[in-house]
DNA sequence: TTGTATGCGTTATCAT
DNA sequence: ATGATAACGCATACAA
C-alpha cells in the first residue's frame, strides 16, 4: 500500500515510442503550431498511450513558471473568506493553475515569512486583506506579480469591495429613522476595509448632521461582538454599524443578554452580508460579494502573468444597503 | 513595478564566495553533520551574505520532494471545513510545508481530475470527505501518500470524527424526552459521515424502541434545510436529527415560517457544532472538532512521508451530545 | 519542420 | 571531510 513511484513516463519514453526527438515531444505540447499536424497527433498518441503528462517541476525549473498561485488570507474562519477562496481556486483551476493557501491569523510577521516561503514556488500572489506593511508588500511585488484584495496601494493591481456607498446608505437610513447618535464598532485595526468603513460612517454622519462615536477595534468574531456591548451601551447611541456581520451578530446576542431588544431598543447594521437572512432578527447589512472579489483578483493576476507590464488596474466592487429587520425608528430614551 | 527576476543567488555563487564546491554548499544545508563545523559556518555566512535560499523547485526535481501538501474538500463554504483547512495549513507550515487547496463542489469527477493535476507536485494528499470512488482513491494512494478524513477505507491512514456515540446519545436523549417517532434528515449521499449518522440514528432508535424515519439526502446548506421542512412535517415525527448544523439551521427557519416553534412543537438536533450558541434558539447538537481532524490528518501524513511503510493508523475522534435549547419533551399531537 | 546541445539549481554517487 | 560529475525532466537557442 505504500506508494510506488511507478517510474512516470518521461519525455524521452514518448520520444522513443513516437520515433522523434525529445524536443519535438516538448513542442507537441508547449508549442504545437510549429510542428506538422500529423507529427503532433503522432506524438500525442504515443503520449496518451504511455499516460505521459509533462512534469510540472521540470517545466518550472526550465521556464520559471510553476503553475501555482498563492492566496493569503488573515482568517479563514471568518465567513467572508471561504467564498473568496473558493472562487479564486475555481478560477485558477480553469486556467490550469493550482492554489496555495496561507492563513495568517491576522499576524503580519507570520504573513511575511509565509510569503517568503511561498515566493520561490508561486507564480503570483493574491494578498487578501493583507496585514503586512506597505514596504513588505512592495518588496514582494518586486519579486512576483501581486494582486491586492481590500488593500489600496498605488501602482499595484487591486480589487476593492467599496463599502463606502453601502455604509453611507446605511447611515442615511439610520438618520432618516430619527437616530441622532450612532456608534461604529470597529474591526481589526490593520484592516483597510475597517478604515474605509469607519471613515464612511464618520463622514456620512457629519453630512447627515448626526453624531457618530467610534468604538475601538476588535478582532472580528462573535464573542468580541458580545463583549463590545457594554461599551456600545455606554455611548448612549441608539444605533450601531458594526465592522462586519459576525461582529454584529455577537452584538445582537449581547444585547438580548442585556435584556435589550433589536431593533426596538437599538438598531444594528452589519457588513458583508455573510449571514443573509439566516439569523433572527434578519440583519440589516451592507452587501459584499466576496466571491466576485476572489474571481476578479485571480483574473487580474492571470492578466499580469501574461503581460507583466500591463497597466495596474484598480477594480472597485460596489456595495449597497440591504435593509432587513434590525433597523427601526430610534427609541426615545 | 513589474517584478524583476533579480537573478536569485544559486548554490554556485555561494560556492564561489565560500571557496568550496557546490556539493559542500548543498551539504551545509541538507546534511551539515558530515561537514566540519567551521566549513558549515563559513558556507552559511556566505549564503547569508548573498541572501541565498535553496531553490525548492530544483530540490524537488532532484529529490522528488516538493514541500507541498494537497488538501481536497468538497465544499469550502460549509463551515465545517474552514477550521479543518486552517488547522491543516498551520500544521503543514510548522513542518515547513505549504498547502495546496482544492475545492470540488461535491463533484467526484472534478475531484478526480484535480488530484490528477496535483499529484505530480504534491508530496501527499489529505482527502477530506472525499467523494471519489474507492477505486480512484486507491489509485491515487498508489502514487502518493494519502490520508483520509471522514472516509473509512481499509489499509489507508484515516481520521474519522466518530459521530456514532454522539448521535446515539442524541437519540437516547430524544427517547427519554418521550419522542416515539423521530426523523433523520440526510446530507450528501456520498458522504461517509452521513452514512454513519444515518445508521447510528436507525440503530439507536431500534434499541430505544422508537421509530425512525429517513428523509432523503440533501446538499448541506441553509436553503436545503428550509425546503426539507414540508417533508419533515409529513413524517409526523416529533423530533428530527439533521445531518449537520447548517441543515438544522435551515430547518429551524423553515419551521418558524410554518408557524411552528422549536422545541415546543418539534425538537431538532444538529451535528458538528459549527453554530455554537450563536443561533436562536441555541441548537442542540453533536460536537465535531474539525480543527482537530485537520491537524491529526496532517500529522498522519507527515508520519507517512518519513516512513512510507508505517502501519496505517485509523484515528477516531470521539463526539458527544451538546444539549442546548432545541430539544424538549415531545408535544402531544 | 525537426534535431542537437545546453542550461535550469539541486542532490547524490563515487572518488579522493 | 570534500570535490567531480552525473542525473532529475523539460525548454529553447541554434543548426540543419
Image (tube, coloured by chain):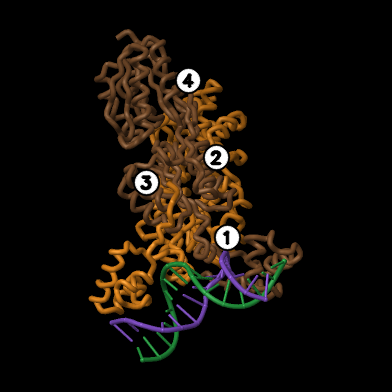
Chain colours: A brown, B orange, C green, D purple
Q: Position of residue A29 (x, y in %)?
A: 64, 62
Label of residue B220 in the image: 2
Circle 2 crowding by C-alpha within 10 Å: few under 14, some 14–19, many from 20: many
**SS of the residue at dot 2?**
loop
Between label 1 and label 4, give the one nearer the viewer: 4
Q: Which residue is mark 3?
A: A138
Within the image, what quadrant is residue D14 found in? bottom right
Q: Earlier in the sequence, mark 4 or mark 3?
A: 3
| Chain of the residue under label 1 | B
Residue under label 1: B137
Spatial distance from mark 2 to mark 3, Cα to Cα?
41 Å
User: Which mark, by number, is residue A324?
Assistant: 4
Which of the pair B119/A130 is nearer the observer?
A130
Residue at left 34%, top 73%?
B15
- Number of the front mark, 4 or 3: 3
Q: Residue at x 56, y 37 (%)?
A: B183
A75 or B317: which is nearer to us?
A75
The residue depicted at 24 percent of the width and 76 percent of the height is B37
Q: Secondary structure at mark 3?
A: helix
Q: Marks 3 and 4: in contact by CB < 8 Å?
A: no
Q: CA distance from mark 1 to mark 4?
A: 46 Å
Q: CA distance from mark 2 to mark 1?
A: 23 Å
Are the residues under badges 1 and 4 in a single subunit? no
Q: Quadrant of residue A54?
A: bottom right
In the displayed image of the protein, which residue is found farthest to the top? Answer: A332
Residues at discs 1 and 3 in contact (Cβ within 8 Å)? no
- State yes or no: discs 4 and 2 in contact (Cβ < 8 Å): no
Q: What percent of the width, then of the height, locates residue A224?
A: 31, 33
Q: Regarding mark 1 in the picture, which secondary structure is present there?
A: helix
User: In the picture provided, is B51 more to the left or to the right than B317?
Assistant: left
Amino acid at each position: 500500500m505504500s506508494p510506488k513511484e511507478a517510474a512516470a513516463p518521461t519525455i524521452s519514453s514518448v520520444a522513443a515510442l513516437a520515433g522523434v526527438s525529445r524536443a519535438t515531444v516538448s513542442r507537441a505540447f508547449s508549442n504545437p503550431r510549429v510542428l506538422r499536424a500529423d507529427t503532433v497527433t503522432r506524438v500525442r498518441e504515443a503520449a496518451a498511450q504511455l499516460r505521459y503528462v509533462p512534469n510540472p517541476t521540470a517545466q518550472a525549473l526550465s521556464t520559471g513558471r510553476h503553475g501555482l498561485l498563492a492566496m493569503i488570507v488573515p482568517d479563514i474562519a471568518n465567513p467572508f473568506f471561504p467564498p473568496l477562496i473558493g472562487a479564486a481556486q475555481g478560477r485558477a483551476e480553469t486556467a490550469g493553475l493550482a492554489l496555495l493557501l496561507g492563513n495568517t491569523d491576522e499576524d503580519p510577521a507570520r504573513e511575511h515569512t509565509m510569503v517568503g516561503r511561498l515566493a520561490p514556488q508561486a507564480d503570483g500572489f493574491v494578498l487578501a486583506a493583507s496585514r503586512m506593511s506597505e514596504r513588505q508588500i512592495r518588496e514582494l511585488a518586486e519579486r512576483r506579480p501581486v494582486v491586492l484584495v481590500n488593500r489600496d496601494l498605488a501602482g499595484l493591481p487591486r480589487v476593492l469591495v467599496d463599502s463606502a456607498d453601502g455604509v453611507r446608505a446605511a447611515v442615511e437610513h439610520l438618520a432618516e429613522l430619527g437616530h441622532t447618535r450612532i456608534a461604529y464598532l470597529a474591526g481589526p485595526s490593520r484592516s483597510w476595509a475597517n478604515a474605509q468603513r469607519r471613515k464612511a460612517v464618520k463622514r456620512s454622519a457629519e453630512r447627515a448632521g448626526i453624531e457618530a462615536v467610534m468604538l475601538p477595534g476588535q478582532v472580528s468574531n462573535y464573542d468580541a461582538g458580545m463583549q463590545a456591548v457594554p461599551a456600545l451601551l455606554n455611548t448612549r447611541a441608539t444605533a450601531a454599524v458594526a465592522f462586519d456581520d459576525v461582529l454584529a451578530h455577537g452584538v445582537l446576542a449581547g444585547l438580548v443578554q442585556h435584556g435589550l431588544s433589536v431593533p426596538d431598543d437599538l438598531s444594528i447594521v452589519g457588513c458583508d452580508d455573510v449571514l443573509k437572512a439566516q439569523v433572527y432578527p434578519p440583519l440589516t447589512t451592507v452587501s459584499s460579494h466576496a466571491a466576485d472579489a476572489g474571481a476578479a483578483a485571480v483574473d487580474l493576476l492571470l492578466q499580469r502573468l501574461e503581460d507583466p507590464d500591463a497597466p495596474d488596474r484598480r477594480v472597485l466592487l460596489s456595495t449597497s444597503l440591504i435593509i432587513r429587520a434590525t433597523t427601526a425608528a430610534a427609541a426615545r430614551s
